[in-house]
Structure formats: C-alpha cells, structure tokens
C-alpha cells in the first residue's frame, strides 16, 4: 500500500491544468482549475433548512444529500438486533455511494433533463433505502417495539450549487462561522480562481474538482494566519483532574491501511469507502471483535495498551497514485493521490476541569467528528485543522494553508463523558457525550479520561491535499473524524486514572 506509481495521462493533464494561488509568503497552493461551480463552496447546509428537490434544468448538481438513517434508530434498540441493523446501515451507505457514482457519470444529462435524475438515480435509491429501512424495523420489532416513522428517511435529494454556501459553522470566534476563517476577501479570491479555471478546462472535465473529480477545490482552503486565536479551555475549578497520560503508538510506519469501519459497519468489507490509518491494535479490520482485539498485537510501546486508534488518511494530489488506485476505499471510491505518513502522532488522555475522572470500560467505542458532515450538517463535526506554531487558532470547515516552516495539524478531541452503562449505542454516539462549556458532564453521565489525538503532516509546498471521504462527501475538511476502541488492560487503565486525578504527567 505504501508504493506509489505514476498517474495516467488523464490524471497528468489534471495536474498540468492547475493554477497557483499564492497566499502571502509561503502559502502556495496548487488548485485544480476545472473545479465545477457546483463544488465551488465548501460549507454543509443545516438540516433545519429546507432541503432542495431535484434542481431545475441547467443548474449544476454536486452531490447526493440523504438523511442519516442511524439518527432515526431508537436509543433503546435491543442488542440482539444490532448485527442485522448495522449490516443494513452499511448496505444503505453502499447504495448511496453507487448512486453518487451514477450521478458523477450523468451530470450533463441531468443538467439538460432533471427528470433523468429522479428516474435513474433518486427513485431507485429511494426504493433501495426503503427496503433496508423496512428490514431494520422488522429486525428491531422481533425483540422490542417496532420503530415508527423511519420510512420518512428513505428519500434523498440532489444538492446543487446554491446548497453549498460557505457561511456555515458555529465556531467560537466568528471566523469559522463564515466558513472562511478570514478577513473577508481571501475566500472570494479562492472562489474566483476556481471559477476562472473551470471555464478554462471545461471541455476536459466539466463538473469535476480535484484529480478524482470530486474535490478538493480552492474554497476548501484558508490561510491560517488570517484566523484570529479561537482555542479556549474552560477554567479549572476546585476538584479538577489536571494530569495527563500519554501513550506512544507510532505513526503507522508499518502502513496498516484498510477501508473498513469495525465500529459502524462490523462484518462489512469497505464499510467506510475510504482508507484509514491505524495505530495501536494491529488486528483491527471489519471482522474484529472484542476477543480478537484483546489478543491482537499492538504498535503501542506499552503492551498494556492494545487499543485501536484510526482516522482517514491524508493524501497529497501530486500526480502519483497510491497502490490502492484500483481498489475499494482508494481509486474505486474516488480517493486518489499519495498517502502521507504523519511526522508525529500524539495520544494524550486528559482530565476534567471540574471533577475527578473514572475509568473507561474496556471495549468502549467512541467516534468523534462526522464522516458525513457535508450532508448531515455540523452538529457532530468537531475535528479541527491548524498549523504548528499557530495552534491557538483552528478551522473545522477549511484545510489550513500554513506558512513556510509550519506543518499541517489535525486534532481530534474525543467525548469525555460516559453514561456509566454502555460501551456502544445504536447510533454509536449517545452512550458518550461532550462536557458543556464549563466542563460539566450532562446529567447521568460521568467524566472519563478524554483522548486528545494530534496528527502532524509535512505537506509538500504547493500541494493539493485532502482527507479520504465517502465519495458523496466531496473530500470536505468538515468530514474529518477519528475512531477509538479502548483495549487498555485494567492495570494500565488504573494507572492512567491515578495519574490524571493526582495531577501528574505519565507515559
């Protein structure tokens, strides 16, 4: 997987057809010049806004927007139904990916005849989703009350240019909320660059962006120096747990990759439709269970930590393909380019600013961020982007352009409150929660050590880069996410809690 090879002639033309966007001394970004107008803005629309129907003839569409079926599952879903439900949810993701591929091949026809989208893409997708939703309801109904109303989640729509406004977000300081993190003119400049290039290369790649044809685009990037400092920590109160426990698990130097997601899609190959980096447990794939994880080898220095840590790979689109160019999760799912190995990965577990922490249960599963935030909205999008030396300022919906000598940083802050009962939940979220702005857990939840994961990359100057994503999520930075399965042994977990609660730094 670590081998690279030269790209095809078509891809080489795409590289040759790039324009340089220079951002004040050192921030040089090569931007694909035939990014479509339909992909020219980067922010996801809020689910509370009206969802568009099939667009009028002549309007470009960029992706498929589907409700998240997992959000309609009952919180008390019986465990006996979980395997069948997870399988159907993975099938639904597969169908959306297939529909997006049909969309990408039919853009010009849809622009001329919107009815084609309904007949050839949205209608069949709705039927497939309806069938899976019905099977989900039946599976739950065998052991508990059958859920009602889930059929309303079957229809999907096409998202067009007007549905991707950049003014999304709820950042702390107003910059990210505009979707640009800037003083007001930089994003416009980037958009102009993308639009101009689209006109110049329309004959070769109409409706395309990035080498894979679906991103990234110029407006997905922002100069980190124009973002005001926006990282704040809650004030520590009496009784706070101020220690830190650090586990060292490498940088995925041994290049363990796969496109599985054992948390969301257990038992399903290519359940993520994008490649993941793995550190820690080396037995992790779609078919891992608690037993195989407990017995698996680990890349962690302390062998008492067999936990699984994984996140989407970061690729640079420099004209070279990775060895997965023809494979699921790679080129088949429109994730192209050379995978970058991080230069640094730090895994810190920190305490609560208002209380002591309690041990995490073994095999606790946590997902932070949202792989479908482009279409789901920002409610669960919390992975952040920054640059070394400037980490007091962060972006969620833009990739950072770093000054010379500064590296790209991805930070994942995991949920730090646990319901005290469950190691997972129907939607893989409700068993854990974030503390509020003051650091307090919701009622009924208890504070646990918070995993703060920091991943650093030396991105070559002038490179287009992006995280892997589901194809329909267009490689937007807001879709970044991280996954964690706790497989600390009890002795090491006890040591971690003791270090954190007594204010020490341990490793």
Image (spheres, grey):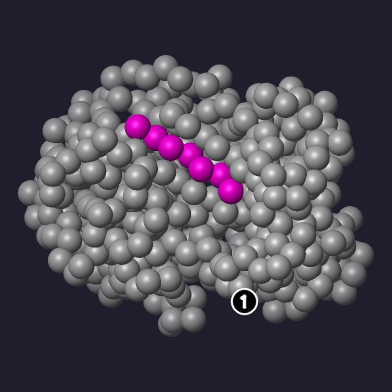
> Which quarter of the image is occupied by the C terminus?
top right
Place of residue 181 in the rendered image (x, y in percent of width and height, measured from the top left) = 29, 64
- Residue depicted at x 39% and y 35%: 457
37 above or below 173? Answer: above
183 above or below 285? Answer: below
Q: Quadrant of residue 40?
A: bottom left
Q: Is residue 443 left or right of residue 421?
A: left
Q: Is residue 269 magenta?
A: no
Q: Can residue 282 be seen in this view?
A: no
Q: Can residue 504 be seen in this view?
A: yes
24 above or below 393? Answer: above
- Residue depicted at x 31% and y 64%: 228
Q: How crowded is mark 1: few (under 14 residues within 10 Å), some or many (20 or more)?
A: few
Q: Is residue 211 left or right of residue 409?
A: left
Q: Main secondary structure of the magenta part?
A: strand
In this view, the residue in front, 415 or 491, is: 491
In this view, the residue in front, 131 or 28, is: 28
- Residue depicted at x 57% and y 54%: 413
Q: Magenta stretch? A: 452-458
Q: Mark 1 points at which residue?
A: 152
């Amino acid at each position: 997987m670590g081998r690279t090879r030269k790209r095809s002639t078509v891809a080489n033309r795409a590289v040759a057809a790039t324009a340089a966007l220079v951002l004040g001394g050192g921030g040089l970004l090569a931007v694909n010049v035939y990014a479509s107008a339909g992909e020219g803005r980067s922010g996801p629309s809020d689910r509370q806004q009206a969802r568009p129907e099939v667009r009028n003839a002549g309007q470009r569409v960029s992706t498929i927007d589907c409700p998240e079926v997992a959000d309609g599952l009952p919180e008390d879903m019986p465990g006996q139904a979980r395997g069948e439900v997870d399988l159907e949810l993975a099938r639904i993701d597969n169908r959306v990916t297939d529909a997006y591929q049909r969309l990408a091949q039919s853009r010009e026809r849809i622009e001329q005849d919107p009815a084609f989208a309904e007949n050839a893409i949205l209608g069949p997708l709705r039927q497939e989703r309806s069938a899976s939703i019905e099977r989900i309801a039946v599976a739950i109904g065998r052991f508990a009350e059958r859920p009602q109303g889930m059929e309303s989640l079957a229809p999907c729509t096409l998202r067009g240019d007007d549905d991707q406004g950049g003014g999304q977000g709820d950042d702390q300081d107003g910059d990210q909320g505009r979707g640009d993190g800037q003083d007001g003119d930089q994003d416009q400049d980037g958009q102009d660059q993308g639009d101009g290039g689209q006109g110049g290369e329309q004959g070769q790649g109409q409706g395309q962006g990035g080498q894979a044809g679906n991103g990234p685009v110029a407006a997905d990037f922002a100069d980190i120096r124009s973002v005001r400092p926006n990282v704040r920590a809650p004030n520590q109160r009496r009784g706070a747990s101020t220690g830190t426990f650090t586990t060292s698990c490498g940088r995925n130097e041994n290049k363990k990759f796969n496109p599985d997601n054992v948390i969301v899609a257990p038992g399903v190959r290519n359940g993520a439709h994008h490649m993941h980096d793995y550190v820690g447990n080396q037995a992790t794939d779609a078919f891992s269970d608690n037993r195989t994880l407990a017995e698996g080898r680990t890349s962690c220095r302390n062998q008492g930590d067999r936990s699984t840590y994984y996140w989407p790979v970061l690729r640079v689109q420099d004209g070279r393909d990775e060895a997965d160019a023809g494979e699921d999760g790679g080129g088949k799912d429109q994730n192209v380019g050379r995978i970058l190995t991080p230069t640094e990965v730090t895994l810190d577990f920190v305490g609560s600013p208002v209380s002591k922490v309690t041990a995490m249960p073994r095999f606790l599963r946590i997902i932070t961020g949202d792989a479908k935030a482009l279409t789901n909205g920002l409610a669960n999008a919390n992975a952040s982007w920054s640059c070394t030396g400037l980490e007091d300022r962060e972006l969620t919906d833009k990739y950072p352009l770093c000054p010379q000598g500064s590296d790209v940083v991805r930070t994942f802050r995991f949920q730090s409150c646990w319901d005290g009962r469950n190691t997972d939940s129907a939607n893989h979220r409700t068993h854990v929660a974030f503390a509020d702005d003051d650091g307090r857990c919701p009622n009924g939840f208890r504070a646990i050590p918070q995993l703060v994961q920091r991943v650093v990359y030396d991105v070559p100057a002038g490179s287009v880069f992006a995280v892997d994503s589901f194809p329909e999520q267009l490689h937007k930075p807001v879709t970044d996410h991280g996954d964690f399965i706790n497989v600390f042994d009890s002795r090491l977990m006890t040591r971690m809690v003791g270090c954190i609660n007594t204010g020490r730094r341990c490793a």
